[in-house]
Image (cartoon, rainbow, N blue to C red):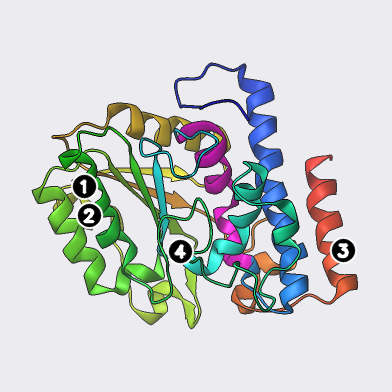
Amino acid sequence: MSADHDSTEQRSPAPERARLEERADFVRTEAIRLIEIAKVGHYSSVFSAAETFAVLYYAVMRLNDDPRWPDRDRFLMGKGHAAVGLFPILADLGYLEREVLDGYTRLGNPLGDHPDMTKVPGIDFSSGSIGHALSNGLGMALGGRLAGKDFTVFVMLGDGEMQEGQVWEAALGAAHHRLGRLVAIVDRNGYQLDGAVDDVIGIEPLADKWRAFGWDVVEVDGHDVEALRAVLGEAKANGTDDGRPVCVIAKTMKGKGVRYMETEPGWHLGYLDPADAERAVAEITERSGR
């Protein structure tokens, strides 16, 4: 990879779109492969977030070859169970040896169902219990301000996570401190472990709630890589040390890319046997023409 890459980097639109879509499908197929090793995993939660992962890491975030670089942008996942889709990107960027992926969840391997920042280079937040990521992101953004750094902190949240009170405490705090370099991304795929989010505890009007808490809000098609790049790139480019934090509500489909997962909420956690995994990979690659 190059020394660093940023949202200001200029590329022709058509090849860039194809590249980011290919990287999103790389996330999907690698997640299938790794879950086959573990024999259980969160397919559909990864698939709804695949384009966001691809756009952040390959087009928007400021990174270089060193995951310890103090000036790089940060990424935290509240929905840490989707980490199996992030680990392949970290390996692709050179933060992990590719062979480490092959031992996913095996005894002694650093990669688990949720990410551990003490074991995995490039992971900024050890998740597990849902609802804590935005608070940690707030702290990182404040720390960056105190240290005179200009990195941006991106925090991905599940829509079911909006039911956690700590999320809204952090939202209040971020707006109060005017953390313009903090960007929350809500993966609004409509489902959580127990079913449809709005059947469990309704969260709408979600955009109005974030605005009422003092955030700028943008809603976007979370599977349109060009739209995502524009929105996230603008949020990064316009971020200041004394501005409003930004909430991006990414409207997505759980299980996006494998048709029967798109219509069956049970794939929040499951297992594809090898033959079914092969068919799922074939559907993803055939749809994308690769």
Please give left or right for residue 21 compared with residue 4 in the image.
right
Amino acid carrying mark 2 in the image: Gly
Q: Is residue 254 visible?
A: no
CA–CA distance between discs 3 and 4?
A: 36 Å
- In the current view of this chain or complex, which residue is farthest to the right? 275
Gap between marks 3 and 2 measured at Cα: 43 Å
Disc 1 element: helix
Mark closer to the chain start, 3 or 4: 4
Q: Residue at image x 77%, y 63%?
A: 33
Instruction: Please give the label number shown on residue 93.
Output: none
- Give the residue pinned by disc 1: 143
Q: Amino acid at mark 4?
A: Thr
Image quarter of residue 255: bottom right
Quick check: marks 2 and 1 in contact, CB under 8 Å?
Answer: yes
Say whether residue 65 is left or right of residue 142: right
Residue at the image position 53 percent from the left and 32 percent from the top: 59
Name the residue carrying label 2.
139
Q: 212 or 86: which is nearer to us?
A: 86
Look at discs 3 and 2 and give the one toward the viewer. Answer: 2
Provide the residue designation for mark 4: 118
Magenta stretch, residue numbers: 44-61
Residue extending farthest left: 176
Where residue 276 sits in the image (x, y, percent)? Answer: 85, 71
User: Of callouts 3 and 2, which one flags the residue occurring earlier in the amino acid sequence?
Assistant: 2
